[in-house]
Amino acid sequence: MTEMVRAAVQTGPRQIEMREFPRPTVGPDDGLLRVEANGICGSDVEIYRGHMGMNPNPFIPGHEPMGIIEEIGERAAERWGVQVGDRVALEVIVPCRSCEDCLMGRYQACRFRKYGHGVTGIDVDPSLWGGFAEYLYLSPNTVMHKISRDLPVEVAAMYNPLGAGVRWAVDLGEAGLGDTVVVLGAGQRGIAAVIAAKSVGASNVIITGLERDAHKLALAREFGADHTVVVDGDGGTDIVDAVAEITGGRMADLALDLTPMAAGPVTDALKSVRHGGRVVLAGLKGHRDIPVATDLIVNRALTVKGAFGVDAAANKKAIELLESGRFPFERLHTHTFGLDDVGLAIETLAGETDDQSALHVSVHPAA
Amino acid sequence: MTEMVRAAVQTGPRQIEMREFPRPTVGPDDGLLRVEANGICGSDVEIYRGHMGMNPNPFIPGHEPMGIIEEIGERAAERWGVQVGDRVALEVIVPCRSCEDCLMGRYQACRFRKYGHGVTGIDVDPSLWGGFAEYLYLSPNTVMHKISRDLPVEVAAMYNPLGAGVRWAVDLGEAGLGDTVVVLGAGQRGIAAVIAAKSVGASNVIITGLERDAHKLALAREFGADHTVVVDGDGGTDIVDAVAEITGGRMADLALDLTPMAAGPVTDALKSVRHGGRVVLAGLKGHRDIPVATDLIVNRALTVKGAFGVDAAANKKAIELLESGRFPFERLHTHTFGLDDVGLAIETLAGETDDQSALHVSVHPAA
Amino acid sequence: MTEMVRAAVQTGPRQIEMREFPRPTVGPDDGLLRVEANGICGSDVEIYRGHMGMNPNPFIPGHEPMGIIEEIGERAAERWGVQVGDRVALEVIVPCRSCEDCLMGRYQACRFRKYGHGVTGIDVDPSLWGGFAEYLYLSPNTVMHKISRDLPVEVAAMYNPLGAGVRWAVDLGEAGLGDTVVVLGAGQRGIAAVIAAKSVGASNVIITGLERDAHKLALAREFGADHTVVVDGDGGTDIVDAVAEITGGRMADLALDLTPMAAGPVTDALKSVRHGGRVVLAGLKGHRDIPVATDLIVNRALTVKGAFGVDAAANKKAIELLESGRFPFERLHTHTFGLDDVGLAIETLAGETDDQSALHVSVHPAA
Amino acid sequence: MTEMVRAAVQTGPRQIEMREFPRPTVGPDDGLLRVEANGICGSDVEIYRGHMGMNPNPFIPGHEPMGIIEEIGERAAERWGVQVGDRVALEVIVPCRSCEDCLMGRYQACRFRKYGHGVTGIDVDPSLWGGFAEYLYLSPNTVMHKISRDLPVEVAAMYNPLGAGVRWAVDLGEAGLGDTVVVLGAGQRGIAAVIAAKSVGASNVIITGLERDAHKLALAREFGADHTVVVDGDGGTDIVDAVAEITGGRMADLALDLTPMAAGPVTDALKSVRHGGRVVLAGLKGHRDIPVATDLIVNRALTVKGAFGVDAAANKKAIELLESGRFPFERLHTHTFGLDDVGLAIETLAGETDDQSALHVSVHPAA
C-alpha cells in the first residue's frame, strides 16, 4: 500500500508544484478514489490564471475527477451503492445535503457547503480534495455516479463536458424533436451541446466558430451539426443573417452562448431566436456589465436561462449516452498529460501553446 | 340609429383631431361595439409622442376598448358566444387564427395579422379600428371577452392593466403561495402586479417607486403590498439592500422590472433574486443596448422572461378577479376624460400636466 | 377538369358504396385537395363496424387524408401558406378557431366545431369531407400541414400514426434522454411510439405483443426497440416481471397502454413504472368501467395522462421526422388499396381476413 | 433532567400501552425534541386497526410530531439551522439523503430509507422514533421545518394536514387564479384543500360531504368554500350534476378525491372536470381494484396524479400560511388528548365514539 500520495498543488497564479500527502485513513462514512483521469475545462484556465476568486490557500485543482473506488467505508458503500473496484465520476460540489435547497433537489444552490473537489484548500483535512492527484478523498457528502469500466478512460473522462451539453441544451434549453438550435462557440462544451441536441432529435443544429476553429467545426459536423458558421475573418458571416437564411426567416427555437468573455454573442443569441424562443447563457464575461438589447427579450417574449454547473440528472444522462456508444466520442479527445504536466495541460487547453487543436484534454495521474 | 360616428384621429405626433366616419354595415361575421371606455397606458404615450413606429397613415388610437355589443352578425354571435347588449373587453391583436402559431395558442406571435385595435389606419375599411371613438368595428378575427355589466365602467376598463399584472407576475413570473416578489415601478401595472401576486398567495410583496410616487406607494399598500421602497432622493434606499434586509439575506423568488427607459432596474432585478430565482422584464428601454450583469444570470442560475402583451388566459383571469370584488379596484381609477380630450388624457397619464396623481386614466366617449 | 368526383360512402355498419358528387366550386377562403392517400387506423375499424356513435347520415369516411392542393382561394392560400401543387396532410378536427379553447391552443377541445374530415355527413355541403374520395373539400377552418413531395406517398401517409407516437410518447409521456419506456401493444401506433421514444434518446424501449405479432415485434426491433415481450401463449411473459428484470428492479419511467378493449394492460402499465413515473392511456375500452389498482397511482405518486388525438405540434414534428429519413419508414407499410376496396382495406387492418400481417394500410384513390 | 421518557407503544391492533424509555444521549449529529403535539390523521386509524402493513415489532406511533428543540448537537444545529428552544415540525420520512432520488429532490421515493417517525420499531435504537411520547429522537437525517412559537400549539400542529392540502390542491393539482375546484370528502384534509385552493385564488371551490358532515361543510364555507354538496341521503345530490349546474356545463378545472375506501368518487372526479382537466387521487381504497371509466381519461385528455405524502416545499408553504393568520385555523381544531389517551384520540378521529364532530385531533404529551 502506498503510504504517500503525489498531487499537483496550485500555490498562486500559474504556480503549480508537486507535493506528497499522507494517504487518508478511511472510516465507515467516507472513501478513497484512485484517480484515473481528470478533464480540463475553461474554468481550470481561469483558476490557473488566478482570475476566479482563487482559494487563498494552496489547493489541489482538478474538479472533473473520475476513477476507481480504492477503499470505501461500510456505510458509505451502502449509501452510494458502490464497492471497491467500481468506476465513478464525481461532481465538483459537495453539498450539505440537509438544507432546504438540498432537500428539494437544488443542491447546486446549497449555501452551507464547505467543500468542493478541486477548490478546497490543503489546509482542510485530509488535503486530497482535487483531481490532480493519485488519490482523492471521498467525503461523506461527495456526489458520485457509476460509469462503466468498459469505456476507454479518455471517453469516461468526458462525463463532465457532455453533462454540461445535456444540462444546457436539453434540460435548461429544452431542445427537442425537430428544433433548430444555434450553438455559439466551438469548444468541447459547444460540441457537447451539439451532441446533446442531436441526441434528442433536434433537426437543425448550427454551430459557430472562428477561422482558427476549422477542425473543431469539422468535428462538430461528425457529431451531427447540420451547419457550421465562421463568424470572424474576411469571409466571416453574421450569425443572425445565417440563421435567418437557414430557417427561411423563421429563426431558431433555441440559442446557447458558450463563449467566454465576448459581449456580442449575448445579443446575437437573442436575435437568433423566434418570438417565444429560448436562450441559454453559459459564457462568463468577467463580472462585467455587458450591453444587451433587452427590448428584444420583451418584444419577442423570450426566455433566457443561466447555466450554472451540471447536476446529477444531467450527469446521469451524459454517462448513459457515453455508455451507449451512439457517437464517436473518442474523436473529441485530443491530449493526455501526466500528473507532472498539469500546467502544460491547462495551457494547451487555453491555446497558449503553439498547438491550437485542443478540445478535450485530460490529466491521467498514472500516465 | 346614428348615421355618422365620431372618433379621435391621430394624424402625427401630438396631433389628434375629431373626425366623423360612416357607421359600418354589419354582416354575418362581424359586429359593432358601442365604446363605453378605453383605458390609457404607457404605450399610448409613446404612440402619441410618435416614438413607436407610428402608423404612417392617420389612425384612431385606443387599444384597450371595452363596451356594449351594439350589432352583431349571426355567425359572429355564435362564434364569440355573445349577443346584442353584452359587455365585452377587446384585445389589441387581431390575429389571423390560421397559422401554426395561432393554432398552437401563440397568437401573440402571429406573423400574418393585418389589423390591430388602436393601430390600424383609417385607410383600411371601415376605419373604426381604435377605441377612441363612439363605435368600434368588430372584425371577424377580433378577440373579445365578456365582462359583467354590474361593474362600474371605470373598473371594467381596468381589464387590460390587471391582465398585464396577472400575465407578468403569475403566468410568466410564476408567483405563488409564500413567495417574495419585488415589483420595480409603481404605475398602474406595478400595482396590478402587486394585486396579482397577492391574489395567488405571495406572502411578501415589495414595490419600489420615486419620491413623487408617495401616494401610489400608499395605494399599493392598500392593495396588499407588504413593503414599499423609495429609491430616489436624499432618503432613497438601494432596492437590493432593502430586499436583503427584508428577507434576511435569502433574497426574492421573483422580481419584475416595469420601469420604462431606465437601465438600472434590469440589473437591480437580477440582484434582487435568489439562486434559481425568476426575473420578468416588461419595461421597454427605447431600443437601446442596456448594460446588464449577465454573469449574475449564469452564476445564480436565473430565468429571465420577456413580458410581451397580455393573452386571453390572463385577460380572463383578470376579468374574474375584477368581478370577484376581492380588491377595492375603484381606488385605482384617477381620471375620466371625454372623447374631445384624448390628448389631455394621454398627457395626464404621462405626467406632463401639473397633476402628478394619475394611475388609471380612461376615455369615455359618451361622457 | 373532372366534373364529378368519386367517393366511398358509408351508409350503415359494414355498408360502403361508391357514389359520385359534383366537384365543389372553390371561393376565396377554401380549396380542393386531390387525395393521394388516406391511412387507416383502429377507429376506422370501429366506425366501419358501427360502434363509434356513427353519423346517422351517410358520410365519406377517411380521417387521415393527404394529397396535393388542386385548387385554392386567394385568401386561403395566404392564411395556410400553400399554393396549388403543394402536398399537405390534414387533421380530422375542423375547429371553430374562435372560442377560448381554440384561442389558447386547445382546439382539440373546441366545443363549437361543426365539421370533421371523415365524420361529417354528405348532407352537409359540399359533401366531400372524407378522405376516401378522389377530391376532398378544404373548408376555411381545415387544419393542414405541408409535407415534402419527395417522400413516397405511402410514407407521407404515415403522418398520422407517427404524429400519435410523437404526441403520446414524447409530448404527453415526456419520454427523454436515457429513459426506460414500456409500450403495451404492437400495432402501427405502438411501433410509432417506439420510433418517437428512440428519436428523443430513450435508451431502453420495451414493447409487448401477442404470439401472432411476431413479425411486428421483429419490425419494432428494426425501429430501435431494445426489448420485445410476448405476453400471451404458453411461453408468455408477465410484462411487469419482465420490466423488473430488465431494469434491475428500478422499473420504467414511462408506460403507454395502446391496447384496444383489454382491461389488464391499464394496471400492467401502472405496475411497470417507478415511483413518480408516468403512464399514458390511449387504448379505448368500449365505454366500460375497467378494474384499476388506483392505490398504485397514489402510493407511487404516478401521473396518468389520457391521449386524445394528435395536435398540430405533434403532426409537425412527425412530418419533420418522416422527411429526415432517420428511420426506414417504408418498412411499416404493408398494404395499399384502391378506392373501390375501402371495406377490404379496413377489414385487412382489423385482421378480419386471412392476412394477419397488416400494420400500415392506406387507400390510394388513384391506384 | 428527566431520566426516563414516557411513550405510547402500539403492540398490536388496537393495543396501545404506556412504557418508559431511557432518555437518549445526544451527539454532534443528532438531537432531542420535546413533543408539544402530534396531530392524528386517517392513516393513524388504519395503523391502529392493523390494516397498513403495521410494523411487526412494537413501535411508538405518531407521524405528525411538532415541538421544541430540547437538545441539539453542534453539527446538527448548523445543518438544520436551529437551536435549543426553537419550535419545529417534522416529516414522517427520514430519507437516506444520498441516493439519486434524494439528490434530485425526490426523497419521498428514497428506497434506502431505514427510519420513519411513527413507524420505526422500538427495537431500533434509541426507540423514541414516534410522536406519541414526551420526547422524540432527532436522527441525523430527520427532516424538520421551523415554525413560529407565537402560534397556539393546536394551530402549529396543523402543519401536516394543511401541507397535504397545499401539495394536493396546489402543487400537484395546479389550482390557480380563477379555477373551479371540486373537493370530494369533507375531512380535515378536504377542508385543508379548500383553504389551499382559495389561498391561490381559485374562484369557485365546491366540496362534498355526507349528511352527517353538515357541521364540517358549514366550516368549509367559513374557510371559503363557495358551494357545499351533500351526496347521500334522501336529498342527496349527484356531484357531477351539481358541478354541471354550477359551472353552466363548463365543468371543473380540477377535482380531488380524498375519500377513503369508496370506489365511486374516482369516476365522479373524472366526470367532474372539463376536457384537459386535472384529477388528484389521495384516497386509498384498501389495495382493491376499483372500477374506473378509463375512456374518460382518454377522450377528455385528462391528467390524473397520485398524491403521496407531503414534501418540504408544501410543508414550508403551509407553515407560512399558518403563520400568516389569513384563515381562522383554530376553528379546525376539535379535540385535544393527553398521552394516556392515544387510543381514544384515534377512535375519536375515526368516528368510533358517540362524538361525530372530530376534524383536527391532536395528542399533547404535556396535557
Image (spheres, coloured by chain):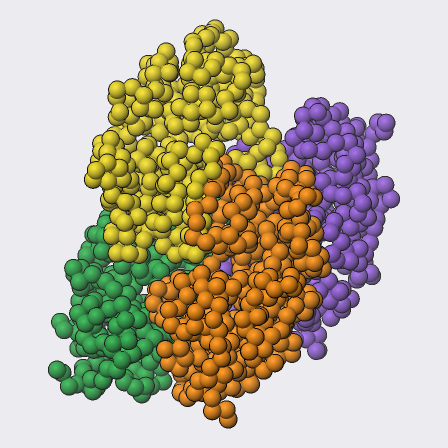
Chain colours: A purple, B green, C orange, D yellow
Which residue is found at the position 34% from the left and 16% from the top?
D344
B138 or D34: nearer the viewer: B138
The location of residue A142, given as percent across then percent down, is 66, 35
The location of residue D39, given as percent across then percent down, is 37, 24
Residue A55 seen: no
Residue C185 seen: yes
The location of residue D83, given as percent across then percent down, is 46, 23
Quadrant in the picture for residue D33: top left
Q: Is residue B334 left or right of residue A302?
A: left
Establish if B64 lies above or below A114. Answer: below
The location of residue D49, given as percent across then percent down, is 42, 20
B154 or A283: nearer the viewer: B154
D360 or D185: nearer the viewer: D185
Which residue is found at the position 28% from the left and 30% from the top?
D332
B88 or A360: nearer the viewer: B88
Query: Residue lying furthest top in this view?
Result: D3
Establish if C20 lies above or below C39. Answer: below
Which residue is found at the position 42% from the left and 29% from the top?
D146
